[in-house]
Image (cartoon, grey):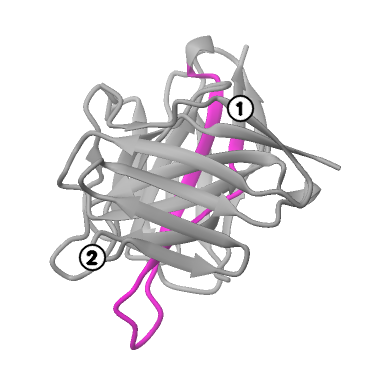
């Protein structure tokens, strides 16, 4: 199947600093990527939908100035957590929409996830 | 407001038996449903999906059933194997006019443990 890669897998940062997480579709072009976060033992919560070349669409309650999303190319979306605080510590997962050539059925593939710990 | 619910946080099944994972949703506008398997500290892995125009989709050991009137779907795994032990999430979505999947709304997950 298609491969979506996230980097870094885990990161520790100091409170008040910013950290960037990358999401790449390795063998396909993704016009749409999604960013989720998951707290321990909870569901994956959608944060924002990222469309290549346009502004991300944020879900209600997600601060767009705090969680900056850039989808500059068809294979890369980035999530930057600005002025991180300990409560931002979470597991962040991206996904990308894969639509095979000539097919009308798409599949959503997920990255491996990135653990963020803010100390 | 949890639009997609998995009321069983955990399920234990003997190897070789059938595992049945259930999922309920509240929004009748959802028209595409997916099941994902997830290990700790990893991203979800796609298992199987079903469109609202169908009531059953089968792929190997995995079968998904959809009951639109009850707003209920289930994932059947048969026979269950120890390697199936993981957290299973159901997800619901709206297909846009181009047929592309929009954002996924996830359930809370069910931890499946398959005992050897």
Examine the rendered structure and indicate whether residue B28 appears above or below residue B45. Answer: above
Residue with the mark numbered 1: B10
The part of the chain drawn in magenta is A88-114
Q: Label 2 lies in what chain?
A: B
Question: Residue at coordinates 27% horizontally, 31% vertically from top-left?
Answer: B3
Q: Position of residue A88 (x, y in %)?
A: 48, 18
Question: Residue at coordinates 17% horizontally, 70% vertically from top-left?
Answer: B98
Left or right side of A56 for A66: right
Q: Residues within 10 Å of mark 2 (few under 14, many from 20)?
A: few
Residue B53 circle label: 2
Q: Secondary structure at mark 1?
A: strand
Examine the rendered structure and indicate whether residue A78 appears above or below residue B106. Answer: below
Q: Quadrant of residue B91?
A: top left
Question: Residue at coordinates 28% horizontally, 24% vertically from top-left?
Answer: A63
Left or right side of A18 for B24: left
Left or right side of A3 for B101: left
Question: Residue at coordinates 28% horizontally, 27% vertically from top-left?
Answer: A65
On-image quarter of the N terminus of chain A? bottom right
Q: Position of residue B46 (x, y in %)?
A: 53, 57
Q: Residues within 10 Å of mark 1 (few under 14, many from 20)?
A: some
The answer to whether the residues at label 1 and label 2 have Cβ atoms under 8 Å apart is: no
Return the residue found at the far bottom: A102
Q: Using the image as rendered, state which of residue B51 and residue A48 is in the foreground.
A: B51
**Residue A40 visible in the picture:** yes
């Amino acid at each position: 199947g298609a491969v979506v890669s996230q980097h870094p897998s885990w990161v520790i940062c100091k409170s008040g600093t910013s950290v960037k997480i990358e999401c790449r579709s390795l063998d396909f072009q993704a016009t749409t990527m999604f960013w989720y976060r998951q707290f321990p033992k909870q569901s994956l919560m959608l944060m924002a939908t990222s469309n290549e070349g346009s502004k991300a669409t944020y879900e209600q309650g997600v601060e767009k100035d705090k969680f900056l999303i850039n989808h500059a190319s068809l294979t890369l979306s980035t999530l930057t957590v600005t002025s991180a605080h300990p409560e931002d510590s979470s597991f962040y997962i991206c996904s990308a929409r894969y639509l095979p050539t000539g097919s009308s059925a798409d599949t959503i593939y997920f990255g491996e996830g990135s653990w963020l710990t803010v100390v | 407001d949890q639009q997609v619910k998995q009321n069983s946080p955990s399920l234990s099944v003997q190897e070789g038996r059938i595992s049945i994972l259930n999922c309920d949703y509240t929004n009748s506008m959802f028209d595409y449903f997916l099941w994902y398997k997830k290990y700790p500290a990893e991203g979800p892995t796609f298992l199987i999906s079903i469109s609202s125009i169908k009531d059953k989709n089968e792929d190997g050991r995995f079968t998904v059933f959809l009951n639109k009137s009850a707003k209920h779907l289930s994932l059947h795994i048969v026979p269950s194997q120890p390697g199936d032990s993981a957290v299973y999430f159901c997800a619901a979505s709206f297909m846009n006019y181009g047929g592309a999947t929009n954002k996924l709304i996830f359930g809370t997950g069910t931890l499946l443990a398959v005992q050897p």
